[in-house]
């Protein structure tokens, strides 16, 4: 299945996968997916990606709309197993989501839902 991800979706999905717990094999699969979708150095620079210290922990911050224009979305091909893992990340995310996540989350969930039909 193909997913088209903008830089905000990629960064948020990367963070969610990075917070998953599991066996070594399960975590390695998330690392593989993270490596595939991570922003390149030029993309990070264009999005003004930076790490900020928040209460003693590093937090990723970036511009939703880069100053030099939008970064184009990128198409990724995922296997059925990888898509199932990505779906589980959203369905089982313990802290849940907030209304402001809608900007990046709803279009991504819509793509995942279309693949189930």
Image (spheres, grey):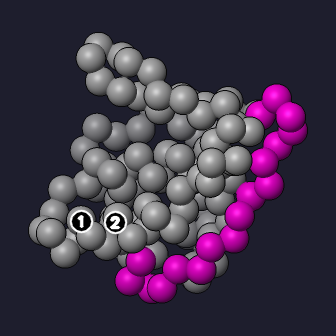
Residue 11 vertical position relative to residue 62 in the rendered view, above or below: below
Q: In which quarter of the image is residue 76?
A: bottom right
Which mark is on residue 100? Answer: none
Rendered location of residue 49, percent (x, y): 60, 34
Q: x, y (%) of residue 18?
A: 33, 51
Q: Residue furthest front?
A: 41
- Give the residue at x 36% y 55%: 17
Left or right of residue 94, residue 79 in this image: right
Please tell me how many numbered marks the rendered image carries.
2
Q: Position of residue 3 (x, y in %)?
A: 63, 70
Residue at x 47% of width, y 28% of height: 51
Q: Which residue lies furthest to the left in this view?
A: 23
Give the spatial CA distance, label 2 vs label 1: 5 Å
Kindly identify which numbered label has been placed on residue 30.
2
Mark 2 surroundings within 10 Å by alpha-carbon count, few (fewer than 14), some (14 through 19), many (20 or more): many
Quadrant showing the C terminus: bottom right
Magenta-span inclusion, residue 78: yes
Q: Is residue 40 above or below residue 35?
A: above
Q: Which residue is drawn at 80% across and 55% down?
A: 72
x 38%, y 49%: residue: 16
Q: Does the magenta stretch include residue 76?
A: yes
- According to the picture, the residue beneath numbered tag 1 turns out to be 27
**Residue 26 visible, this angle:** yes
The quadrant where residue 104 appears: top right
Residue 113 placement: quadrant: bottom right
- In contact (CB < 8 Å): disc 2 and disc 1: yes
Relative to the observer, which residue lies in front, 103 or 19?
19
Query: Which secondary structure lies at badge 1?
Result: helix
Crowding at dot 1, Cα within 10 Å, few <14 / some 14-19 / many 20+, comes out as some
The magenta segment:
66-82
The image position of residue 85, as x and y in percent, is: 35, 71
């Amino acid at each position: 299945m193909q997913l088209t991800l903008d830089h905000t979706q990629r960064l948020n999905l990367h963070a969610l996968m990075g917070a998953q717990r599991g066996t070594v094999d399960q975590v390695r699969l998330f690392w593989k997916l993270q490596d595939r979708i991570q922003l390149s150095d030029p993309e990070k620079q264009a999005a003004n990606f930076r790490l900020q210290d928040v209460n003693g922990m590093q937090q990723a911050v970036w511009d939703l709309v880069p100053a030099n224009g939008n970064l184009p979305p990128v198409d990724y091909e995922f296997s059925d197993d990888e898509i199932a893992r990505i779906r589980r990340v959203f369905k089982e995310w313990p802290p849940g989501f907030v209304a402001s996540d809608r900007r990046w989350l709803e279009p991504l969930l819509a793509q995942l839902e279309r693949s189930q039909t």
